[in-house]
Image: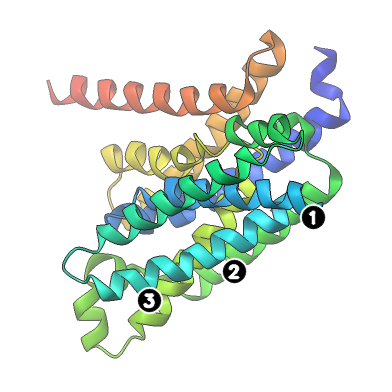
């Protein structure tokens, strides 16, 4: 039980709760727009940035952030170029991100073990700077979503109608994608690049099963996310499991439980 009162565990809880708030706030808009896989894409590009940061001796999360934002702009450009096949933009950028990350991994120089921690998450290694950056990104995301909530809502349900009504859809699309890049880049050290999209999508999937409206879905998604973060970290801390994995498995368990309860009530 002593681990629960350790400084590193407290930082892990704070960082996890912050991401647990920011991720589903954006995830609901991504899910409704059929862009659930964008999380995996930006995560792979972020890993390439992290590897580049180790090579250049630059703060890895900062380089992951830069790479993911550049990728976000690339996705939006390709979405406009392939309007009928918009999902191609995600496939193309993901392929490029994986290729670049693999190339940088091949450069070695003794940092591969450090980069691997970003693949699977290392929330216990969060330092004060990491928590500060996560906090700033979370506050920024919450602020933007609050001020552009109606615009994001209309864009998610009918982009064409939003454009006809005079909304700057191109600008709004870019804002959502860049915000997602910010959240992904600071999340990879918490749950890992291979699992980060789970925080964007699974809480939303769970809330959609039982919600009665958009705002209700959003609130429930945040609750699911925060509960899974706390439960996952407590289980990992008490039984020495991988924290990123336990967080995601907690999310999946909650989704299965929600589906089961919903089905039982229908019967």
Q: Which residue is mark 3?
A: 151
| Vertical relation: 184 (above or below) 110 | below
| Residue closest to the far front | 107
- Is residue 7 rendered to the left or right of residue 54? right
Quarter of the rendering occupied by the N terminus: top right
Q: CA distance from mark 1 to mark 3?
A: 37 Å
State which tag comes first along the sequence, 2 or 1: 1
Above or below, 32 against 3 in this view is below
The residue that appears at 44% across and 37% down in the rendered structure is 198
Label pair 1/3, CB-CB below 8 angstroms: no
Which secondary structure, mark 1?
loop
Residue 70: give x, y in percent of width and height: 54, 67
Relative to 196, residue 173 above or below: below
Foreground residue among 104 and 221: 104
Determine which quarter of the picture holds residue 125: top right
Quadrant containing the C terminus is top left
| Residue 138 is at least partly visible in this image | no
- Lower sequence index among marks 2 and 3: 2
Q: As drawn, which residue projects farthest toward the top? A: 239
Q: Residue 143: give its label.
A: 2
Residue 154 percent across, percent down from the top left: 29, 72
220 on left or right of 237: left
Q: Residues within 10 Å of mark 2 (few under 14, many from 20)?
A: few
Q: Position of residue 80 (x, y in %)?
A: 29, 75
Q: Quadrant of residue 197?
A: top left
Reading the image, the residue beneath label 1 is 58
Graded by Cα atoms within 10 Å as few (under 14), some (14 to 19) or many (20 or more), the crowding at tag 3 reads some
At label 1, counting other C-alpha atoms closer than 10 Å, the crowd grade (few under 14, some 14-19, many 20 or more) is: few
């Amino acid at each position: 039980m002593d681990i629960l009162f350790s400084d590193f565990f407290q930082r892990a809880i704070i960082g996890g709760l912050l991401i647990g708030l920011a991720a589903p706030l954006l995830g609901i808009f991504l899910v409704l727009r059929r862009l659930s896989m964008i999380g995996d894409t930006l995560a792979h590009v972020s890993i390439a940035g992290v590897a580049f940061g180790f090579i250049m001796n630059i703060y890895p999360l900062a380089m992951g952030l830069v790479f993911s934002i550049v990728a976000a702009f690339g996705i939006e450009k390709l979405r406009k170029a392939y309007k009928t096949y918009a999902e191609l933009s995600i496939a193309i950028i993901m392929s490029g991100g994986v290729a670049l990350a693999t190339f940088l991994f091949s450069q070695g120089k003794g940092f591969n073990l450090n980069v691997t921690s970003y693949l699977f998450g290392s929330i216990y290694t969060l330092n004060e700077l990491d928590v500060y950056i996560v906090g700033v990104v979370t506050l920024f995301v919450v602020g933007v979503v609050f001020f552009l909530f109606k615009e994001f809502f209309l864009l998610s349900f009918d982009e064409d109608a939003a454009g006809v009504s005079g909304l700057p859809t191109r600008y709004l699309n870019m804002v959502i994608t860049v915000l997602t890049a910010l959240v992904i880049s600071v999340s990879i050290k918490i749950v890992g690049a291979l699992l980060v999209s789970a925080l964007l999508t699974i809480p939303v999937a769970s809330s959609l099963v039982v919600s009665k409206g958009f705002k209700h879905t959003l609130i429930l998604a945040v609750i699911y996310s925060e509960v899974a973060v706390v439960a996952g970290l407590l289980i990992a801390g008490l039984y020495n499991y991988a924290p990123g994995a336990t967080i995601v498995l907690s999310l999946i368990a909650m989704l299965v439980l929600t589906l089961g309860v919903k089905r039982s009530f229908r019967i």
